[in-house]
Image: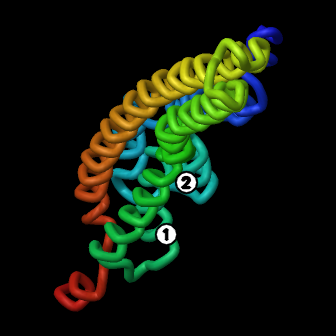
Amino acid sequence: MLSIIQAAGWPIWPLILCSILALAFVLERFIKLKQDRVFPPNLADEAIGVSREAVPAPDMVHQLEQSSALGQVLAAGWRAIASNPRCSEEEMRAAMEAAGRKVAHQLERYLPALATIASAAPLLGLLGTVIGMIEIFGSQAPTGSLSGGNPAQLAHGISVALYNTAFGLIVAIPALIFWRYFRARVDGYVLELELAAERFARHLEPLCPGPLKESAR
């Protein structure tokens, strides 16, 4: 491996850095996007069950918020009602929507960086290819004959061109695959979160007195 890096020359170092960052982003997203961390299957039903009559105690609200991404959205509805006795349905839904946008942003963390690496790696490989070609032409004799040039410099230029092209594709292709995989996974989670939040909001509507309901009474 070290001999390949030496043969590829200095242009390969940015690609090595990109590969390390891409691997770190992929591992981090695999951990953070586990279903238990984002959308536990029975969490919404459990939250509905413990809040049929009233909003639970603050410690339970905090526990729900810390449990998962879905818990953050559901806890926002509880907290809106508990912090404002005159909270309306619109205010409760607005609080949950704000929490949902924050969660969606957290789920998309590092995905733009991974997409950037997938786009930039082939360009970095192309840069190494161009540098290798410059070295090849620089190794020619003044007459333009390759045979009269420096064979060692010619071979080095060829290795720089080919190794950087190949390594750029090696970095870009997996990064693109994982970006599309995580992108689809996040989109699926966001849809499930929206459906669960809508269901939970309808459950919380009777607990929102609001000014209109109070005046009607």
Q: Position of residue 217 (x, y in %)?
A: 20, 85
Q: Is residue 113 left or right of residue 159?
A: left
Q: Is residue 42 above or below residue 116?
A: above
Q: Is residue 101 left or right of residue 142?
A: left
Report the residue at 26% width, 64% height from top. Answer: 205
Quarter location, residue 23: top right
Q: Using the image, tell me which numbered label, if any, was put on residue 167.
A: none
Q: Which residue is nearer to you in this view: 120 or 154?
A: 154
At label 2, counting other C-alpha atoms closer than 10 Å, the crowd grade (few under 14, some 14-19, many 20 or more) is many
Q: Position of residue 172 (x, y in %)?
A: 50, 28
Inspect this view and state whether residue 127 appears. Answer: yes
Report the residue at 22% width, 82% height from top. Answer: 213
Q: Quadrant of the N terminus?
A: top right
Q: Which residue lies under the disc numbered 2?
A: 61
Report the residue at 36% width, 38% height from top. Answer: 189
Q: Earlier in the sequence, mark 1 or mark 2?
A: 2
Q: Which residue lies under the disc numbered 1?
A: 82
Q: Are marks 1 and 2 in contact (CB under 8 Å)?
A: yes
- Classify mark 2: helix, strand or loop: helix
Q: Residue furthest front?
A: 143
Q: Position of residue 34 (x, y in %)?
A: 50, 27
Inspect this view and state whether residue 31 appears. Answer: no
Q: Position of residue 43 (x, y in %)?
A: 42, 36
Q: Callout 2, which amino acid? A: Val
Report the residue at 30% width, 40% height from top. Answer: 192
- Classify mark 1: helix, strand or loop: helix
Q: Callout 1, which amino acid? A: Ala
Whole-angstrom CA distance, mark 1 to mark 2, is 10 Å
Q: Which residue is nearer to you in this view: 90 or 15?
A: 15
Q: Is residue 207 left or right of residue 74?
A: left
